[in-house]
């Protein structure tokens, strides 16, 4: 018996768009308790290789240290962690070569109003109605191993070398207010290297927009990002060194070239005295 094919991302997005209103750029509005689908494209150069489960895109709404995605609390090493910061996300598949752009969707749920008492007790604030909040998409790429900083990472600027998907990269960097390493690039979106609370080194690329808040807004919708999230990495792998021939090969090659030149000179002299011509193709 033939099995039915699983719906593709494009098919799923089409089905969702028929049931939920589409929202274009700069018109994002969220309501307490609302659920929204965020539709976006991710773009990378063909030579960038991403391993399965080693990259992700998170979607969340926030101001300062307050997150407005619905979530729960758990404790790690004495610190309380709120899952709203990372739970609404797309976990990446293995992706190398072409296509260079792929489309994805992430579902997000907004906290209720008033929000749970546990959130307030842990320092979160209520969703500010009739105002605006930050709307962020964060691309996270896990490094293959610990990065290497010039000066051992103790300086406020320098050069950092790291690897992602088996490819080496190297950038100048500066250290920001939070102690993260910010790469010096022409990309308008900031690229940073930092270490997570679990000790994992990651490259972060942020797209930060804004969203309005209203209690009377639609509690569902599809937010469409017009421009792709760009993983704009440039490889810094050293070019291959020129092949160094053994001494014996060099000697034999030199003798051969000398004999060929001597023979050509003798042939030209012979033709000259014999009145012949030499045809040279240009």
Image: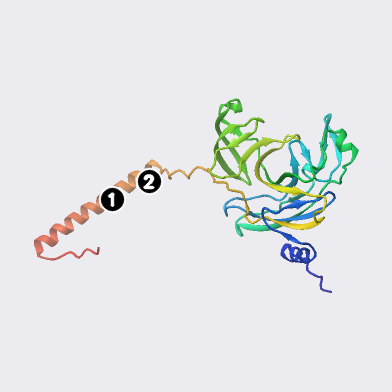
Q: Report which residue position mark 2 lands on.
A: 249
Residue at 64% from the left image edge and 30% from the top image edge: 177
Point out the residue furthest to the right here. 117
Please tell me which residue lies in front, 49 or 63.
63
Mark found first going from the N terminus, 2 or 1: 2
Residue at 81% from the left image edge and 70% from the top image edge: 4
The image's mark for residue 55 is none
Gap in Å between the C-alphas at discs 2 and 1? 12 Å
Q: Left or right: 164 with respect to 104?
A: left
Q: Left or right: 268 with respect to 231?
A: left
Q: Report which residue position mark 1 lands on.
A: 257
Number of numbered discs on residues: 2
Please tell me which residue lies in front, 49 or 120.
120
Please tell me which residue lies in front, 169 or 205.
205
Residue at 89% from the left image edge and 37% from the top image edge: 118
State the image coordinates of residue 64 (x, y, percent, origin top left).
73, 36
Disc 1 residue crowd, few under 14, some 14–19, many 20+, Cα 10 Å? few
């Amino acid at each position: 018996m033939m099995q039915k094919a699983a719906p593709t991302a494009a098919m799923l997005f089409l089905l969702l768009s028929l049931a939920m209103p589409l929202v274009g750029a700069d018109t994002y509005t969220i309501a307490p308790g609302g659920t929204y689908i965020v539709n976006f494209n991710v773009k990378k150069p063909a030579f960038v290789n991403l391993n399965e489960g080693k990259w992700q895109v998170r979607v969340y709404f926030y101001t300062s240290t307050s997150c407005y995605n619905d979530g729960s609390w758990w404790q790690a090493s004495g610190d309380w962690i709120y899952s709203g910061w990372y739970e609404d996300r797309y976990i990446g598949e293995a992706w190398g070569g072409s296509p260079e752009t792929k489309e994805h969707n992430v579902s997000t749920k907004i906290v209720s109003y008033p929000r749970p008492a546990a959130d307030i007790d842990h320092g979160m604030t209520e969703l500010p109605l009739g105002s605006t909040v930050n709307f962020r998409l964060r691309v996270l790429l896990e490094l293959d191993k610990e990065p290497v900083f010039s000066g051992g990472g103790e300086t406020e600027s320098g050069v950092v070398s790291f690897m992602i998907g088996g490819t080496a990269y190297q950038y100048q960097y500066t250290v920001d207010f939070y102690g993260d390493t910010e790469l010096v690039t022409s990309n308008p979106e900031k690229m940073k290297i930092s270490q997570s609370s679990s000790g994992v080194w990651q490259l972060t690329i942020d797209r930060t927009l804004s969203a309005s808040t209203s209690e009377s807004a639609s509690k569902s919708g599809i937010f469409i990002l017009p421009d792709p999230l760009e993983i704009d990495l440039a490889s810094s792998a050293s070019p291959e060194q020129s092949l160094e021939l053994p001494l014996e090969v060099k000697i034999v090659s030199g003798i051969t070239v000398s004999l060929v030149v001597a023979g050509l000179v003798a042939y030209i002299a012979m033709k000259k005295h014999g009145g012949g011509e030499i045809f040279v193709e240009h």
